Amino acid sequence: METQPGTHPAEPHHPNVAKRLNWLRAGVLGANDGIISTAGLVVGVAGATTDSMTILIAGVAGLVAGSLSMAGGEYVSVSTQRDTERALLAKESAELAEMPEAELRELAGIYEEKGLTPELAAEVARELTKKDALRAHAEAELQIDPDNLTSPWHAAWASLLAFAVGALLPLLAIVLPPVGLRVGLCAAAVVLGLVITGTVSARLGGAKVVPAVVRNVAVGCLAMAVTYGIGVLFGVTVT
């Protein structure tokens, strides 16, 4: 495994690691949404009817609709972010062409605020500007990598797949077991899935695992309890 200069094998530093972690966290949260929303849907329908085909159709419809909704929302959101990044880069490029000295002083000021002496900050700013002025200013001022802008299509596909994978858990857990066991087994499978997603998301975010898992499981159980109660109220109680 390659490492960047100045690192050692036990501590590899990869470029864009923060962005990769963000994508991974988003994928975990997407799967979590798929589990909770689909579980609430199929358990609610199971509270109203014992017909497996009805439950399956409702679950598949929820999976498809939820996946497409997540993908569409993520595409629109990230497209807006990408447009904003491009506009900021265009503005920065124009400023570099029109007022290079002012931009150089601004870049040096950023490094002074980070703790460098004025002389060293000015030298760093000159060297970075000499190498790639737009990149230097984009990364320091805007926290944008000009060569690695966010991709709306990647975000859309990631959200779609993550939601669909999460939704499959409660869907399979509700339609495969016998009628008398399906709700209980589905609930158990959902709790297990939420424990996993809660644990992973907490670790990725550097948060405490137990509170994150408890919140996650509590929300999922509440969703299933409410929708199951509504299903029983308007349909046929499963015995």
Image (cartoon, rainbow, N blue to C red):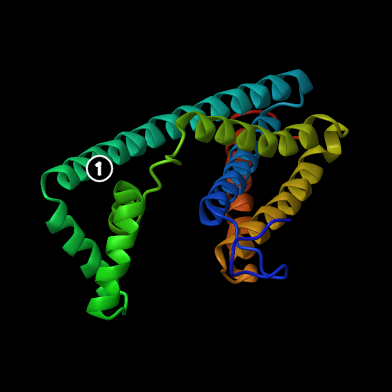
Q: In this view, does 67 lie above or below 202?
A: above
**Residue 50 image offset from top left, x and y in percent:** 76, 26
**Residue 31 image offset from top left, x and y in percent:** 63, 42
> What is the quadrant of the N terminus in the image?
bottom right
**Residue 12 image offset from top left, x and y in percent:** 66, 64
- State whether residue 70 appears in this view: yes
Q: Nearer the viewer, residue 226 or 212?
A: 212
Q: Is residue 83 above or below residue 187?
A: above
**Residue 72 image offset from top left, x and y in percent:** 46, 27
> In the picture provided, is 95 more to the left or to the right than 130?
left
Outermost residue toward the right in this view: 178
Label 1 sits on a secondary structure element that is: helix
User: Image point 12% across, 58% down: which residue?
Assistant: 102
User: Image point 60% across, 27% down: which residue?
Assistant: 62
Q: Which of 180 and 142 is in front in this view?
A: 142
Q: In this view, does 144 lie above or below 83?
A: below
> In the picture provided, is 40 more to the left or to the right than 192?
left
Residue type at the position of mark 1: Leu
Q: Nearer the viewer, residue 68 or 152?
A: 152
Q: In which quarter of the image is residue 168?
A: top right
Give the mark count: 1
User: Image point 67% across, 23% down: which residue?
Assistant: 60
Q: Nearer the viewer, residue 122 or 137?
A: 122
Q: Name the residue under label 1.
A: 88
